[in-house]
Image: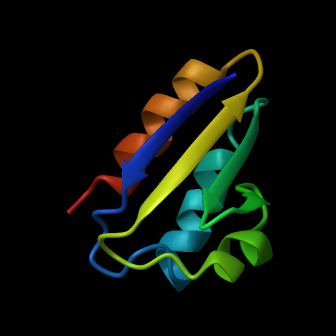
Amino acid sequence: MVEKIIKVELPSGLQARPAAEFVQEANRYTAHIFLEKNGKKVNAKSIMGLMSLAVTAGEEITLIADGMDEETAMTELVSFVSKK
């Protein structure tokens, strides 16, 4: 299991279209992937879960990946939310 605190750099945060794209990217991996914000942990492969966090630009979230391809998933998903 790998875990990393990351700052969301996307101008609109993880709202609507970026959230859907993030979920699509997360679903490419077999690892279990979760996002945590303010103590609330959700499945990053679920659009409803991700939207319930209401992640805005500049916020810090914890990304957790656990599985065979966890390192690759972590690298790609961190890169995704770090885009400006």
Q: Residue furthest top?
A: 68
Residue under the point 50% across and 75% down? 55
Q: Is residue 15 left or right of residue 1?
A: left
> Which image quadrant is residue 39 in?
bottom right
Does 78 sit above or below residue 80?
above
- Residue 61 lies, in percent from the top left, at 50, 57
Q: Which residue occupies the foreground of this view, 47 or 60? A: 60
Q: Which residue occupies the foreground of this view, 19 or 57? A: 57
Q: Residue furthest front?
A: 39
Number of callouts in the render? 0
Q: Is residue 50 left or right of residue 84?
A: right
- Residue 76 lies, in percent from the top left, at 45, 36
Q: Is residue 82 left or right of residue 74?
A: left
Residue under the point 57% across and 32% down? 3
- Residue 71 lies, in percent from the top left, at 56, 20
Task: Specify the color scheme.
Answer: rainbow
Does 25 sit above or below residue 39?
above
Residue under the point 29% across and 70% down? 58
- Residue 75 lies, in percent from the top left, at 44, 30
Residue under the point 20% across and 63% down? 84
> Which image quadrant is residue 2 in?
top right
Instruction: Indicate the quadrant containing the N terminus: top left, top right, bottom left or bottom right.
Output: top right
